[in-house]
Image: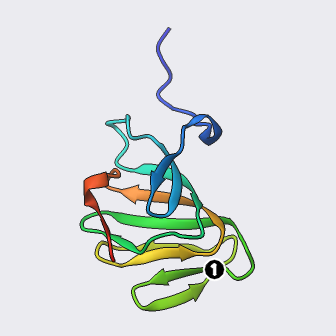
Amino acid sequence: MNAPRYQIVDFDRISPTPCPCGAARRAFADRPDYPATVHRTEISVDAKPHYHRHLTETYYVLDCDGDARMQLDDELVPVRPGTCILIPPGTVHRAVGRMTVLIFVLPKFDPEDEVVAE
């Protein structure tokens, strides 16, 4: 019997990895036939502004407090569940307030590409 071509991921079974935003559970990094990674990230209250040199991120807000916002360069943008934000390379960003986001990263996430903006 052939192995299935699809893959199912349960984010609750992926160990969280600390990141400038909080804690990310990253999926599909091991799939050479998939061009991205998908992260479910729990944002911490002390998320650090950062940017990526080459990666494009798409944030989809799953859950957040009523006053949650995203810092995108010098602008603070209110968000709510269902908000989707495209963040191209070089855009300084961070989540402000408690939220859970699904992040699609193209190409695959590379920690060396992430720069904390102090």
Residue 31 vertical position relative to residue 62 in the rendered view, above or below: above
Three-letter amino acid code of the residue under disc 1: Val
Comparing 3 with 14, the one in front is: 14
Identify the residue at horizontal 40%, vertical 57% (top origin): 105
Comparing 95 with 101, the one in front is: 95
Label 1 crowd bin: few (<14), some (14–19), many (20+), radius 10 Å: many
> In the rendering, at what x and y percent does residue 88 appear?
35, 73
Residue 32 vertical position relative to residue 26 in the rendered view, above or below: above
Comparing 13 with 47, the one in front is: 47
Instruction: Give the quarter of the figure containing the C terminus.
Output: bottom left
Going by the image, does 50 lie left or right of 113?
A: right
Identify the residue at horizontal 38%, vertical 50% (top origin): 36
Label 1 SS: loop
Which residue is outermost to the bottom? 75
Identify the residue at horizontal 58%, vertical 64% (top origin): 44
Residue 11 vertical position relative to residue 63 in the rendered view, above or below: above
Residue 13 vertical position relative to residue 62 in the rendered view, above or below: above
According to the image, label 1 marks what residue? Answer: 79
> In the rendering, at what x and y percent does residue 68 appear?
65, 79
> In the rendering, at what x and y percent does residue 24 appear?
51, 51
Q: Give the image quarter of residue 101.
A: bottom right
Which residue is outermost to the right? 66
Colour mode of the rendering: rainbow
Going by the image, does 103 lie left or right of 106?
A: right
Count all numbered tags in the image, as a single digit: 1
> In the rendering, at what x and y percent does residue 86 appear?
45, 73
